[in-house]
Image: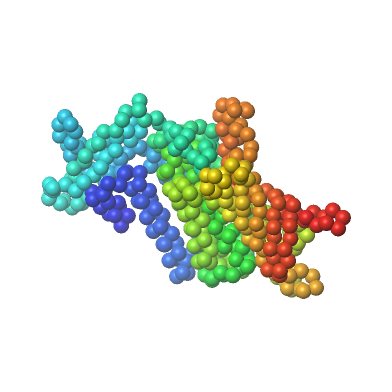
Amino acid sequence: MSFYICTKLLVTTKLDSITLVVMHHLSAVTNRLLVILRNAFVGKASTRFTSGRRLLTSDRYLVVGMLMQFISIIQCYAWGQDCATYFAPATSYKAHSVFNEISISTRDLPLASDFQSEFFFVPTSQHVPYASNPIENIIVDAQITPVPTSDAISDTLSEDEFQYAQHLRYTMDGSAPLRFSKIKPIPMILTGGLYAGAIWGLHVYQKQTLWNQRSDRFHVAEDGDYALHVDKCGHFFGGYIMSYYASEILQSSGVSYQPARVWGTLMGIMYMGYIEAEDGFATGWSFSPSDFYWNVTGATYHLLQSYVPVLQNFTPKWIYMPSNLIGEHRRLTDYHTMHEADNFNDDYSSSTFFLSMKMHNLLPEGWKEYWPKWITLDVGYAARNLGWIDPKNYLQDRKLIIALDYDLVEMLPDFSKCVGGNLGNILNWLKQSCNYFKFPSPALEFGESGMTRFNLLYPFKIRIGSFKF
């Protein structure tokens, strides 16, 4: 079905080849996910293999699947073929140039990075009789529209084209962002291994904590009010940050900027979807539709920021501080046994999620000079003492936080000038990536119980004599 749709689009639209390749893989991944969920609902997903492993629970299948996902993306660009070649190698086209009209096969089309021309496919007025495979007999008119040569168009994006919230962005390996995809083998191997290793580490950690007890059935249950809704903020941030890092890894491997954003978003959705599938087989947990929706929303927001620049002024952030260090209790999973959350991801009593607003960019021109670039205004949400219902001790309480914050990209120096070379740009990327995590700062904390508190360094509670900050 995805093959037919992409081929139909090829001969009736002006979509470029990279877009069609992405659509083809997206539809293939979606079909695979639907098959997995269908099998899960009919009870096939819990079928044991002869070695005793379960579907979706084998560590080996996880790592191999993640690597294949990464490699399949890289292959689309490493081959460098036109989309028509990828879908139908035997397809032929008529190409009109200013000199003559020639018939060519897609096998003869040059690499996009070499030719640097944009192909637009329009419906043909001439057809040949269909054979057993009609795809191989599609003939269209290919209008080759010349574009300026490599002397006029750089292979890399300019500083004006590669920005986030009106500030220069940086890549993971410190190199200039590519305009045309060109795979870099060594960075691809290193970053691909880093990606697989991170996924493996997260899987092992959660398997030892959240997924240590397995069920033979796939459970689906809605938990919209779980952890006083802080859980949904966590899923939004999870989808966002996993998409960000996947995009950065792809870009450092040689994938150009926009395709890397699209593929990274899809990889973020797939990983967070895998987390939900594992929850569906864990005892005491379940696949939550609302959790999955928030995963997708967070990942989609990451992609939208590339196309709607004003959204870059609203950045999700997260701060985690163990509750016992700030005078609170960890989340109780069972009040009767006083069992606390085993996994920091699930200890929502210790997490606060923010939306950081870059006010300098949002204020009118006449007011910008009064608001420093390196200060942002954050709005956050938290819930403390989750699971505690003893009024003599602690009560769970929702918190609304309004805080001043630091924009590390604006506040810290440009390391490319201090250190120089590629190392400086790598350090710049690190400060860019740390900007998605909140650090202690002055804040006003409004509690559901009616208590308002000023924190000098939220979330810490500082006491000097009779004064509490």
Residue 214 against residue 248 in the figure, above or below: below
Residue at far right of view? 465
> Is residue 142 shown left or right of residue 65?
left
The number of callouts visible is 0
Q: Residue at x 83, y 56 (%)?
A: 467
Can see residue 283? no
Residue 31 placement (x, y as % from top left): 39, 58
Q: How is the image coloured?
A: rainbow
> Is residue 260 shown left or right of residue 284?
left
> Is residue 171 shown left or right of residue 380?
left
Please state, as top left, top right, bottom left or bottom right, where the C terminus lies in the image. Answer: bottom right
Q: Residue at x 30, y 51 (%)?
A: 6
Q: Residue at x 63, y 66 (%)?
A: 227
Please state, as top left, top right, bottom left or bottom right, where the N terminus lies in the image. Answer: bottom left
Residue 337 against residue 184 in the figure, above or below: below
Can see residue 31? yes
Residue 67 placement (x, y as % from top left): 49, 46
Give the camera-side residue of 11 and 62.
11
Residue at far front of view? 366
Give the camera-side residue of 244 and 208.
244
Q: Residue at x 35, y 51 (%)?
A: 24
| Res. 72 image quadrant | top left
Residue 312 placement (x, y as % from top left): 51, 48
| Res. 366 image quadrant | top right
